[in-house]
Amino acid sequence: MIIVTGATGQFGSKTIDHLLKKGAEPSTISALVRDVKKAKRLADTGITLKAGDYNDHESLISAFKGVDKLLLVSSNDKEAFGNRTSQHLNVINAAKEAQVKQIIYTSFIRKPHFEDSAIAAFQNSHVQTEEALKASGINYTILQNGIYLEMIPIFVGDKVAETGTIMFPAQAGKASFVLREELAEAAAHVLLTESHENKVYQLTNTEAVTFDDIADALSIQLAKGVKYHSPTLNEFEMLLRKLGIPDLYIGMFTMWGTAVAQGTMDLEDNTLQTFLERKPTSMIQFINQTYG
Ligand SMILES: NC(=O)c1ccc[n+]([C@@H]2O[C@H](COP(=O)([O-])OP(=O)(O)OC[C@H]3O[C@@H](n4cnc5c(N)ncnc54)[C@H](OP(=O)(O)O)[C@@H]3O)[C@@H](O)[C@H]2O)c1
């Protein structure tokens, strides 16, 4: 039996779609969901729904009974990275108690000296989860996922076609953006194939790109000159504040822009390509599909 957590979220639901597409029997798949009412589409596929919350130990134990492989989709708790870590530790402890045989965890790509980067606190949550997994005695597979291509429209803003301007403090930094859907497909591959025990995979694209590259791709697709400007952090924060963006999101945008500038996501790896048995969707293909 496989269980996928975060199953009403985007990554979890896409992973379940890929498990079914790859031929897994619905009776061998279960989904951990916080709100069963949100899971009608999943229920219609014939898989089993288990109600549970990362903060509720008992619900996790009962959901994990009889499970062989558990896909732990990292929490999206926005309040504090510490909340996220303790939720992940709850899942690992409950899995141990329920005698789950393997946990596959969606982590994030990491480079040496990440401790000094803008995303250090975010990374520490993943590091602590990975360490707890390794210490748990349960077989683990760590999927160090790259940054989603789907973050690009959020970073460039929804007015880019009108203004022809991207304002983002990423300087000339490169990032290896990947399609969430393809990371989910890779997770389904790992769940359905063998020999992934106690392995760590870096799942990135085969080519990292700059925001100048993104501006060039947008210029071609929109048939309009799009220019990229990297403001100072001060200018950027003032601009977002003027637009009425809440402080929590200003902090996140600034954090991600700085992390790209620092090159923390500038990694190129072929593992995802191997799992997909094709080249991952490139930034240019994504821009063409999204803005076409
Ligand atoms: N690589 C990247 O660029 C990138 C970007 C964004 C996020 N991420 C990480 O990847 C994860 C998956 O991405 P996504 O796009 O699928 O995010 P998402 O759509 O926000 O899904 C997150 C899932 O986590 C579930 N969840 C949150 N708190 C929970 C709790 N206390 N108990 C049980 N379930 C809980 C949510 O449940 P509900 O459906 O009930 O809300 C949701 O299903 C995110 O959570 C985040 O950690 C990675």
Image: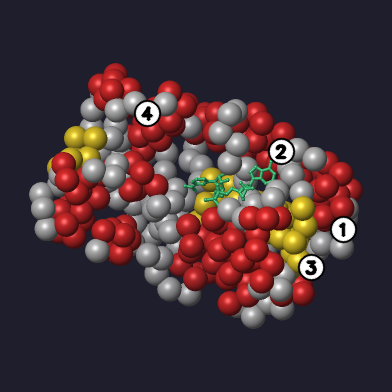
For badge 1, the amino acid type reads Lys
Q: Residues within 10 Å of mark 3 (few under 14, many from 20)?
A: some
Viewer-nearest of labels 4 and 1?
A: 4
The local secondary structure at tag 1 comes to loop
**Label 4 sits on residue:** 245
**Label 1 sits on residue:** 65
Dot placed on the residue nearer the N-terminal end, 2 or 4: 2
- Between the residue at mark 3 and the residue at mark 4, the CA separation in whole angstroms equals 43 Å
Dots 2, 3 in contact, CB < 8 A: no
Ligand 1 closer than 8 Å to label 2 CB:
yes
Viewer-nearest of labels 2 and 4?
A: 4
Q: Residues within 10 Å of mark 1 (few under 14, many from 20)?
A: some
**Label 2 sits on residue:** 87
For badge 2, the amino acid type reads Gln
Task: Give the residue displayed 48% in from the left and 57% down from the top.
Answer: 180
Q: Residue 220: which quarter of the image?
A: bottom left
For badge 3, the amino acid type reads Met
**Label 3 sits on residue:** 1
Q: Which mark is residue 158?
A: none
Quadrant of the snapshot with the C terminus = bottom left
- Between the residue at mark 2 and the residue at mark 1, the CA separation in whole angstroms equals 19 Å
- Between the residue at mark 2 and the residue at mark 4, the CA separation in whole angstroms equals 28 Å
Dot placed on the residue nearer the N-terminal end, 2 or 1: 1
* Residue 71 seen by the camera: no
Task: Give the residue displayed 39% in from the left and 53% down from the top.
Answer: 149
Dots 3, 1 in contact, CB < 8 A: no
Q: Is residue 28 left or right of residue 217?
A: right
